[in-house]
Image (tube, helix red, strand yellow):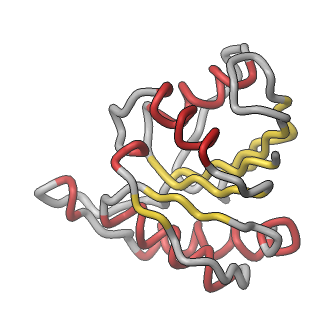
Amino acid sequence: MELYILRHGDAENSFPDSQRQLSDQGRQQVITQAKQHSQSLAAIESVITSPLVRARQTAELVMSQASIHCPPQITDCLLPNARVAEVEQLLEKNNSQRILLVGHLPLLDQLINYFVGDSVARMATASLASLSMNHAYRDLATLNWIHHAN
């Protein structure tokens, strides 16, 4: 399985948190990441995103910029304080070989560290990570790279 993990782009400071939208800078960060990785991302078979506005907007932008043509799945499993175990179960049920997760901190750092078995992740806004693994279990992934937005 190829797992891509994307943190949402920079968001406006507004209330309530669940309705915060991407800022102009955040949109540009996401577009740049999508264009730089369009070849890899075009092969995505499944997009799974947090329900928060900034994550959904990030997913939509990446999908349009990288020509990803599957319907996004929205799940509470990718909310900021969701549990890694929920994501692990979600991935095990998914039959896709190339999956994009779009979410938030602190969950995304925890998720990468859990799968890789090391404290390596430091996801900034619009950071994109690539992991390879046969199964979505602890310590079984290889971290290919983390690319931070410019």
Residue 94 position, x and y percent, is 63, 51
x, y percent for residue 74: 41, 62
Q: Looking at this view, is 72 or 6 the one in front? A: 72
Q: Quadrant of residue 109?
A: top right
Q: Give the camera-side residue of 87 and 129.
A: 87
Q: Is the C terminus in the top left, top right, bottom left or bottom right quadrant?
A: bottom right
Residue 12: name its quadrant: bottom left
In the displayed structure, 29 sits above or below 4; it is below
At horizontal 69% and vertical 24% (from top left) the residue drawn is 137
- Above/below status of 113 relative to 126: above
In the image, residue 73 above or below residue 77: below
Relative horizontal placement of residue 85, taking residue 62 as reference (left or right): left
Exactly how many numbered labels are in the figure?
0
Vertical side of 84 occupied by 36: above or below = below
Q: Is residue 78 left or right of residue 37?
A: left
Residue at horizontal 73 percent and vertical 57 percent from the top: 96
Residue 25: image x %, image y %? Answer: 48, 70
Location of residue 14 (image quadrant): bottom left
Residue 150 is left or right of residue 10, and the answer is right
- Identify the residue at image location x=36%, y=39%: 80
Front in this rendered view, residue 139 or 125: 139
Question: Residue at left 23%, top 58%?
Answer: 13
